[in-house]
């Protein structure tokens, strides 16, 4: 069974936790897009792990974790992550971690350009500053440098020289920024390549051979549907295909080999960074939920914006990704609320939009239409079976299921592995 896990909102839905659980029954766990802008949290035996590039299945010892060709890799972050894991007693060898030779590489000029571009924009995106956008831009402009290029110093030399020739001019003339030394980058990256080369391989062959042998592949989406470059709230998006289709492009597994797509949604909504957010809470209520849900970015530590569950948004995610099953996370965060609202439409100039509008004016100026639910006012974190959930919780979940037209198969009631209900 080959399954894609995608975020159905604006990222941080709790994908890391869900991947860690589903990884128990998988043979391969594959990241297919994004880069170290992702922060996926897994909590096991009281220890918290935050993964940026390494697939969240790595804590299971006998699994193969793959960084697919669609991922942009910052070697410094990756080596840091391998070291951090070592300090927590998790040792990674080259059987457990494989990196595609076709991954594009993030360089210091990508990180700097990311920040400089943000500083010049009138309408800021609020990027993570990890160089993601500029690296994907180079990939599409066909001047990017891939892992396989790092393995061949003479090829790497020519490509890096070409890049710096053009980029240093731009840095100086457009951004009044000093520029980058070829020698330093060349030396630093060759050093890091020495440590990473044992993980680099042809992952397309690896993955397809695994599929032929009927191994179970689990694809770990990063970001979320509304940060997707095509289906998100453009331009307030990331630069990759975060939706399920990205799993094929970013790994080399053909589309007909995907069996199932599971969408991960929070029981409410959050967003970090700028951009429209129709169901966003008022400041004081937002502060309250942020504290309840500890809604601070796993990568940047920024406070996340919080709002009610938006079924217009999530329904579009079901459509675009072909989601048949849902994992609802952070249900426990709503435990103390007397009333809970769900958005079922956007009212704009007398018209109610029930399907997701991409018009920026509608997205920013609409008045959400809400259905109200009585809260359950009971703690849920200790509950382990769907039946035992309070009646009002079941009413809430049942309505979400109807609105989204997908089946809830997992409910998460806490950050720990065991705080999970299989419906
Ligand atoms: P991801 O990017 O989708 O993997 O999500 P993040 O790791 O960025 O953010 C999710 C946060 O919520 C993490 O701190 C998780 O430990 C935490 N979390 C996940 N599921 C639950 C849950 O059901 N309840 C609570 N209270 N926290 C959760
Ligand atoms: P995970 O995988 C939430 C957001 C940034 C910004 C926009 C563009 O943990 O869910 P980028 O650095 O990618 O160019 O930033 O996308 N963003 C995320 N928000 N979760 C993420 O990843 C995100 N990755 C990027 O905040 O608004
Ligand atoms: Mg995250």
Image (cartoon, rainbow, N blue to C red):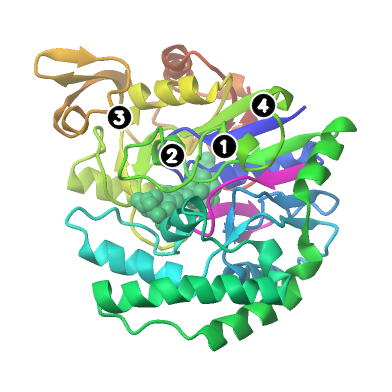
Mark 4, Cα crowd under 10 Å, few <14 / some 14-19 / many 20+, is: few
Q: Can you identify the residue that label 3 sits on? A: 338
Q: Can you identify the residue that label 2 sits on? A: 228
Residue at 67% in and 63% down:
147
Looking at this view, is 372 or 318 the one in front? Answer: 318
Q: Is residue 51 above or below residue 26?
A: below
Looking at this view, is 64 or 269 the one in front? Answer: 64
From mark 2 to mark 1, how far is it between C-alphas?
9 Å
Q: Which residues are magenta?
A: 28-48
From mark 2 to mark 3, how far is it between C-alphas?
34 Å
Label 1 element class: helix
From mark 4 to mark 3, how far is it between C-alphas?
45 Å
Residue at 81% in and 67% down:
198
Q: Can you identify the residue that label 1 sits on? A: 246
Disc nearer the start of the sequence (1/3): 1
User: Where does the image place residue 234, in percent across and percent down from the top left?
Assistant: 32, 40
In this rendering, the label closer to the viewer, 4 or 3: 4
User: Where does the image place residue 109, in percent across and percent down from the top left?
Assistant: 44, 72
From mark 4 to mark 1, how far is it between C-alphas?
10 Å
In this rendering, the label closer to the viewer, 2 or 3: 2
Label 4 element class: helix
Label 3 element class: loop
Residue at 59% in and 52% down:
71
Q: Can you identify the residue that label 4 sits on? A: 255
Disc nearer the start of the sequence (4/2): 2
Specify the quadrant that holds the C terminus.
top right
């Amino acid at each position: 069974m080959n399954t894609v896990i995608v975020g159905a909102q604006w990222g941080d839905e709790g994908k890391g936790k869900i991947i860690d659980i589903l990884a128990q029954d998988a043979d391969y766990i594959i990241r297919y897009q994004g880069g170290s802008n992702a922060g996926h949290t897994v909590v096991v035996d009281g220890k918290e792990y935050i993964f940026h590039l390494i697939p969240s299945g790595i804590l299971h010892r006998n699994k193969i974790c793959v960084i697919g060709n669609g991922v942009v890799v910052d070697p410094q972050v990756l080596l840091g992550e391998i070291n951090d894991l070592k300090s927590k007693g998790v040792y990674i060898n080259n059987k457990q971690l494989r990196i595609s030779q076709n991954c594009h590489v993030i360089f210091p000029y990508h990180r700097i350009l990311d920040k400089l571009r943000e500083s010049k924009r009138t309408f800021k995106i609020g990027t993570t500053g990890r160089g993601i956008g500029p690296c994907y831009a180079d990939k599409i402009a066909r001047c990017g440098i891939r892992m396989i290029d790092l393995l061949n110093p003479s090829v790497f030399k020519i490509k890096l020289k070409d890049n710096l020739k053009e980029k240093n001019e731009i840095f100086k003339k457009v951004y009044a920024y000093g520029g980058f030394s070829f020698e330093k980058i060349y030396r630093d990256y060759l050093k890091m390549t020495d440590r990473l080369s044992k993980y680099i391989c042809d992952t397309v062959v690896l993955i397809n051979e695994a599929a032929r042998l009927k191994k179970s592949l689990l694809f770990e989406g990063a970001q979320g549907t509304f940060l997707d470059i095509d289906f998100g709230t453009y331009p307030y998006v990331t630069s990759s295909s975060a939706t399920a289709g990205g799993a094929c492009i970013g790994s080399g597994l053909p589309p007909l080999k995907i069996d199932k797509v599971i969408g991960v949604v929070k029981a409410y909504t959050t967003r970090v960074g700028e951009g429209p957010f129709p169901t966003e809470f008022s400041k004081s209520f937002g502060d309250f939920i942020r504290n309840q849900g500890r809604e601070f970015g796993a990568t940047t530590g920024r406070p996340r914006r919080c709002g009610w569950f938006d079924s217009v948004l999530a329904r579009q995610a079901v459509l675009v990704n072909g989601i048949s099953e849902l994992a609802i996370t952070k249900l426990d965060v709503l435990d103390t609320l007397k009333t809970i609202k769900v958005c079922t439409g956007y009212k704009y100039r007398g018209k109610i939009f029930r399907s997701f509008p991409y018009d920026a004016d509608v997205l920013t100026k609409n008045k959400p239409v809400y259905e109200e639910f009585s809260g359950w006012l009971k703690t849920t974190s200790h509950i382990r079976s769907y039946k035992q959930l309070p009646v009002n919780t079941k009413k809430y979940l049942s309505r979400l299921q109807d609105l989204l037209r997908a089946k809830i198969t997992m409910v998460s009631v806490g950050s720990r592995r065991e705080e999970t209900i299989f419906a």
